[in-house]
């Protein structure tokens, strides 16, 4: 008798390890520190592994990134001092997000390092939607599920986040380069 | 459409996140309005710059090792059975695009009239017509669709093929309604789509009703301890035919 298992369920490693880069990238951007990001990712994988029996979906990446995000926010709260300690409210940021203002920057000339510095200055809630959408290429719907916010909020956070990013870029460009 | 109503959509337009109808409206406006067209091209340049210049940090090789050895130290949990299917068939895509084009629908605009479940169902139906979420399991075979739900739901939805009544099964996906997981079965009616949501019924609540909103029709009923809610853009009379055929076969 041949004992074959034609449809063995995929293992945790098979489903989740392909998303290690996405997990690290999100943690690296949220925590803004490579060592913290490594610790957070390891922590998130352990938690995900422990909870894997309850994983029912087909979207391993979104599931893993949700856990990474939670771990990162816990760490940000534990840091306690710093801008993230202030509760984030979408409404209080009265920043204009008129799309016509997007031409205030010569985008094709923007250097990667400057853009990175500008993005790191945004609140985590704006940073994450930009990272998830622009770098990881996640659609609005997946970001909404991951962050637990409505699709409309994803849309407005992206719009405001990009406008804010642009304002930070202009502010950075106006400063003399640090020695 | 006016500039004021177009401007808030430009960002989602640049991201390719608008439904087909809105997409076409925005493009028609941009062709006629130089100011909005300039704003749109500035947004596109910004988007390209962000995509091209923002670094993606790859995980350090040592982290992979750390994660693996960390996992090795604990007993692996049993995995839920996960089956991956291609999300789209050309036929399903064509059907959804055709339906979206006929509808003139945009999400978020039909909350007021019907109760929460119907509102959710209309929303589910509308979202399902947007690219990428009509079906998670593509199959015209009820014996493929039914097992797909196993392990994903705590109940077993009756999966029927109503091809003989003019509603061939196209596939299924997971939805949420009433704050809990529901099965969504997708049927075709010529170029239209019928979404049938199925979830366990609350005790003592067997209701049959019909609702209309924004060109969508919905019919709900309870049978065998489950709630059924069919939603579609097809005429109410056709939806009643569908509901009657389903109830008869499920019996």
Image: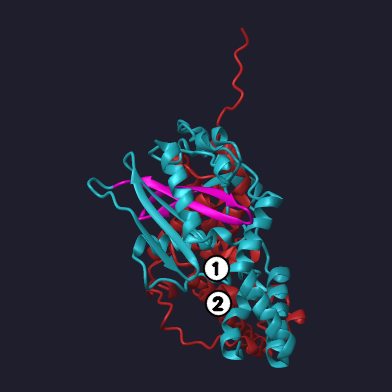
Q: Residues within 10 Å of mark 2 (few under 14, many from 20)?
A: many
The residue at 60%/84% (across/down) is B6
| x then y, percent, for residue A92 | 41, 83
Q: Which colour scheme is used?
A: by chain
Q: Residues within 10 Å of mark 1 (few under 14, many from 20)?
A: many
What letter labels the chain drawn in cyan?
A: B
State which region is magenta.
B174-201
The one nearer the camera, B65 or A122, is A122
Predominant secondary structure in magenta?
A: strand
The one nearer the camera, A29 or A61, is A61
Residue A173 vs A122, above or below: the answer is below
The residue at 59%/74% (across/down) is A119
Instruction: Give the left or right position of residue A15, taking residue B49 as reference.
Output: left
Residue A110 falls in image quadrant: bottom right
Q: Do the residues labelled 2 and 1 touch (CB within 8 Å)?
A: yes
The chain identifier of the residue carrying mark 1 reads A
Q: How many marks?
A: 2
* Residue B133 visible somewhere in the drawing: no
Q: Judge if badges 2 and 1 mark residues of a common chain.
A: yes
Disc assigned to residue A31: none
Magenta stretch encompasses residue B194:
yes
Colour that chain A carries in the picture: red
Residue A154 vs A12, above or below: the answer is below
Disc assigned to residue A129: 1
The one nearer the camera, B45 or B24, is B24
**Label 2 belongs to which residue?**
A161
| x then y, percent, for residue B116 | 35, 63
């Amino acid at each position: 008798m041949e004992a074959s298992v034609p449809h063995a369920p995929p293992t945790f490693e098979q489903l989740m390890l392909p998303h290690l880069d996405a997990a690290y990238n999100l943690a690296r951007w949220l925590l803004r520190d490579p060592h913290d990001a490594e610790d957070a990712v390891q922590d998130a994988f352990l938690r995900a592994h422990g909870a894997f029996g309850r994983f029912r979906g087909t979207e391993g990446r979104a599931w893993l990134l949700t856990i990474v995000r939670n771990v990162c926010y816990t760490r940000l709260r534990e840091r306690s001092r710093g801008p993230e300690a202030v509760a984030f409210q979408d409404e209080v940021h009265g920043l204009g997000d008129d799309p016509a203002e997007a031409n205030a920057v010569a985008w094709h000339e923007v250097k990667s390092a400057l853009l990175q510095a500008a993005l790191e200055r945004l609140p985590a809630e704006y940073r994450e939607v930009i990272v998830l959408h622009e770098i990881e290429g996640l659609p609005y719907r997946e970001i909404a599920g991951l962050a637990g916010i409505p699709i409309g909020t994803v849309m407005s956070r992206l719009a405001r986040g990009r406008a804010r990013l642009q304002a930070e870029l202009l502010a950075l460009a106006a400063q003399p380069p640090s020695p | 459409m006016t500039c004021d109503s177009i401007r808030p959509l430009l960002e989602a337009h640049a991201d390719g996140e608008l439904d087909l109808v809105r997409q076409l409206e925005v493009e028609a406006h941009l062709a006629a309005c130089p100011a909005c067209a300039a704003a749109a091209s500035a947004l596109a340049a910004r988007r390209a710059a962000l995509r091209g210049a923002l670094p993606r940090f790859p995980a350090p090789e040592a982290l992979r090792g750390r994660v693996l050895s960390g996992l090795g130290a604990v007993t692996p949990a049993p995995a839920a059975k996960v089956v991956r299917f291609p999300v789209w068939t050309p036929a399903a895509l064509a059907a959804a695009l055709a339906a979206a084009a006929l509808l003139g629908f945009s999400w978020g605009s039909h909350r007021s009239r019907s109760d929460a479940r119907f509102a959710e169902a209309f929303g589910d139906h509308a979202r399902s017509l947007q690219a990428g979420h009509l079906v998670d399991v593509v199959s015209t075979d009820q014996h493929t669709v039914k097992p797909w739900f196993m392990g994903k739901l705590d109940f077993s939805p009756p999966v029927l093929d109503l091809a003989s009544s003019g509603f061939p099964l196209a596939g299924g996906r997971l939805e949420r309604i009433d704050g809990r997981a529901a099965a969504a079965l997708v049927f075709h009616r010529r170029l239209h789509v019928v979404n049938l949501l199925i979830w366990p019924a609350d005790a003592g609540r067997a209701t049959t009703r019909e609702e209309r909103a924004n060109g969508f029709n919905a019919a709900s009923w309870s049978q065998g301890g489950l709630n059924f809610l069919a939603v579609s853009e097809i005429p109410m009379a056709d939806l009643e035919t569908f509901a009657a055929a389903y109830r008869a076969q499920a019996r």
